[in-house]
Image (spheres, grey):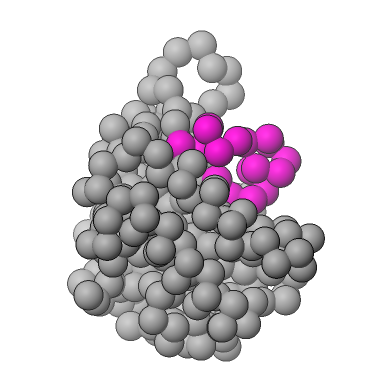
Amino acid sequence: MSRKPIIAGNWKMNKTAQESAEFIQAVKDKIPAKDLVDSVVGAPALFLENMTGAVKGTDLQVAAQNCYFEEAGAFTGEISPKALSALGVDYVIIGHSERREYFHETDEDINKKAHAIFRNGMVPIVCCGESLETYDAGQAESFVGKQISAALQGLTKGQVASMVIAYEPIWAIGTGKSATKDDAQKMCAAIRQVVAGDFDQETAESVRIQYGGSVKPENIAEYMACPDVDGALVGGASLQADSFLALLEAVK
Ligand code: PGA
């Protein structure tokens, strides 16, 4: 089965509204056709309204970096998935290791968020990945497998087939120390096996799995050549327009 590549930038807590607008202006007419590759920018919630407006009619799509699992209510400071959807946001990144570590998000929270994102007509990009300690102990596969089973619990096969999983070893995020392509392939294949076991083979062959962690224009082709890697979730190298466009060029 051929799966369409998906490249998603994760800006994290970077840029001002002005800088985000300048970025969109610089890239929006140079995005490859959406039938070749899904090109996504994950921006801070503050700019999403401007961004979904600015990308209208282009092939660029917009992701939020987080949301809450309730649509509305007394949840001070949280981001409503219903409100994101109303802005025209396409994807929501959930379960990033920074959110798990600094904001204490649990597998159960991430599962509830995945359901809420689907309920509101958007697509979750569910992140998973192990620490260096877990990797060195040879337990990466079982650790990540558990994260994925928990995140996907109760979703339908159709939902899982349409979603995105991002495998990001924590030791490779923002460190410049990327995983080898063999590591990335092995883990993405293992994740697909978990999906096959929890759902079925057809679902596993449809779900798109990204590698993330120090992906750059210079190394993205190596990862994309791996049969089970369908794209990349990119932090640092997605912040500059030139570098973001170079990532897209390399996969289209
Ligand atoms: P990086 O971040 O590309 O800067 O390593 C990836 C991520 O955290 O999504």
| Image mark count | 0
96 or 226: which is nearer to us? 226
| Residue 193 occupies quadrant | bottom left
Dominant secondary-structure state across the stretch colored magenta: helix
Quadrant of the image containing the N terminus: bottom left
Q: Nearer the viewer, residue 127 or 37?
A: 127
Residue occupying the far front of the picture:
197
Decide whether residue 239 is among the magenta residues: no
In this rendering, position of residue 236 left or right of residue 20: right
Residue at the image point whose x is 53% and y is 33% from the top: 108
Coordinates of residue 14 in the picture (x, y in percent): 64, 54
Q: Which quarter of the figure is the C terminus placed in?
A: bottom left
Magenta region, residue range: 95-111
Residue 245: percent from left, percent from top: 45, 77
Verify whether residue 107 appears in magenta.
Answer: yes
Residue at left offset 36%, top offset 55%: 197
Position of residue 160 measured from the top left corner of the image (x, y, whole percent): 31, 50
Residue 13 left/right relative to 201: right
- Image quadrant of residue 226? bottom left
Q: Looking at the rendering, which quadrant does residue 41 occupy?
A: bottom left
Residue 54 seen from this side: no
Is residue 227 among what the camera can see?
A: yes
Residue visible at 27% across and 62% down in the picture: 201
Answer with left or right where residue 134 lies relative to residue 93.
Answer: right
Q: Residue at x 29, y 32 (%)?
A: 119
